[in-house]
Image (cartoon, rainbow, N blue to C red):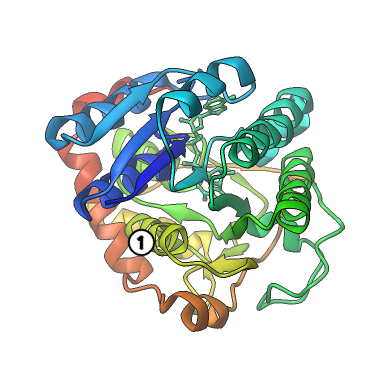
Amino acid sequence: MSVFLLAGTAGFIGAKVAEQLLAKGHFVVGVDNVNSAYDTRLKIFRLREISRSAKNFLFYQNDIEDIAALEKLFQKHSFDAVINLAARAGVRASVENPFVYMTTNAIGTLNLLELSRRNNVKKFVLASTSSLYAGQKPPFTEDFPANSPLSPYAATKKAAETLAITYHNLYKIDLSILRYFTVFGPAGRPDMCIFRFIKGIDEGTPLEIFGDGAQTRDFTYLDDIARGTVLAAETPVGCEIINLGGGGEPVPLNAVIAFIENELGKNALRLSRPFHAADMSVTAADVSKAKRLLGWTPRVSWQEGLRHTVAWHNAQRELVNKIIV
Ligand SMILES: NC(=O)c1ccc[n+]([C@@H]2O[C@H](COP(=O)([O-])OP(=O)(O)OC[C@H]3O[C@@H](n4cnc5c(N)ncnc54)[C@H](O)[C@@H]3O)[C@@H](O)[C@H]2O)c1
């Protein structure tokens, strides 16, 4: 059994990573400030789901910007690895309020790196993003330059990546930087398109579509992303950036909407919005490195994943109806 510090445990991906680590018999110390970047009812729901079955789980409502609070956790527990999924994550919202993105994504990561160094933690995993490939020709490989971010979100993730690489160079902490590609699944983020589309079509409220809906995404199912993250946390690699993405043909938003309409037996109402300058028109992952280093390939197709996600929304309608998007 290994002991993991998991920052961002109440988050969409963090909660699933916690569940999978616990299922493998590990001990998880979860940290999250449960902020109101989106409706906290979803975060509380996810924490309840984790606590329901877990013996080896402790949760602390702490802010990764607060190094003194984090230090107490490092004194109390001896971590085999630190996984940092805590972040401000919305692309468009980062244009409105870039400062909190900088303090959480860059300084928060630095706090965790510094405490890992002081406490001889051997492994660090950092969640990063496909947004860094803006301007590159798909499919994206990890050696592409990622120096032309379109949003403060991507820029602060690049800052976090660079700090983490510095800590590897200086102190040899084993580092896996995971670049996730548009993740979707049950109990998703209400600021992301799939949650908004399912809720909007189900409730008959118009969907805001930025651009013509022909933009494509390499959608990746939650369970696959979590499995890749757990493998990364368990596998020494030295220092590597690794894509975790669907890896197939990127899917247009219009195809996603048509699929959900079909699943729900309802038609979408649409509100056209101009394409946002911070958005990318296409994302597509080359995932061969993840296969080579971690033995990871995605298992769930976007259609199968979407069926599970719509089923979750149907089962949790009482909660979903209350969520403000
Ligand atoms: N969902 C995606 O498609 C996607 C794609 C690329 C990268 N990522 C990255 O994956 C990670 C997880 O994303 P997610 O989709 O689960 O987002 P999320 O917002 O659901 O999860 C992030 C969690 O971090 C917590 N958090 C934020 N600031 C914090 C702070 N200062 N201190 C402590 N906790 C804090 C939030 O409360 C939240 O629960 C993030 O780093 C994100 O940038 C996600």
**Residue 31: percent from the left, percent from the top?**
44, 28
**Residue 295 in sight:** yes
Helix, strand, or loop for circle 1? helix
Residue at 34% from the left image edge and 27% from the top image edge: 42
Instruction: Characterize the local packing of mark 1: few (<14), some (14-19) or many (20 or more) Cα atoms within 10 angstroms.
Output: some
What percent of the width, then of the height, locates residue 275? 73, 48
Tell me: residue 267, above or below residue 245. Answer: above
Image check: 3 left or right of 54?
A: right
User: Residue at image x 35%, y 61%?
Assistant: 227
Number of callouts: 1
Query: In the visual, does 122 lie left or right of 263?
Result: right
- List the residue tagged with mark 1: 227
The extreme right residue here reads 148
Q: Residue at x 79, y 71 (%)?
A: 136
108 up-or-down from 14: above or below:
above
Nearer-the-camera pick, 274 or 63: 63
Query: Is residue 254 rendered to the left or right of residue 50?
Result: right
Instruction: Establish if 233 lies above or below 296.
Output: above
Residue at (34% x, 40% y) in the render: 15
Question: Which of 316/36 is in front?
Answer: 36
Q: Is residue 66 visible?
A: no
Which of the 4 image quarters holds residue 50?
A: top left
Q: Say which amino acid is labelled 1.
A: Arg
Q: In terms of image quadrants, where is residue 289?
A: bottom right
Task: Determine if the C-beta at disc 1 is less than 8 A from ligand 1.
Answer: no
Question: Picture coordinates of residue 322 (x, y %)?
Answer: 31, 20
Q: Nearer the viewer, residue 213 or 316?
A: 316
Measured as percent of width and height from the top left, residue 219 is found at 48, 63
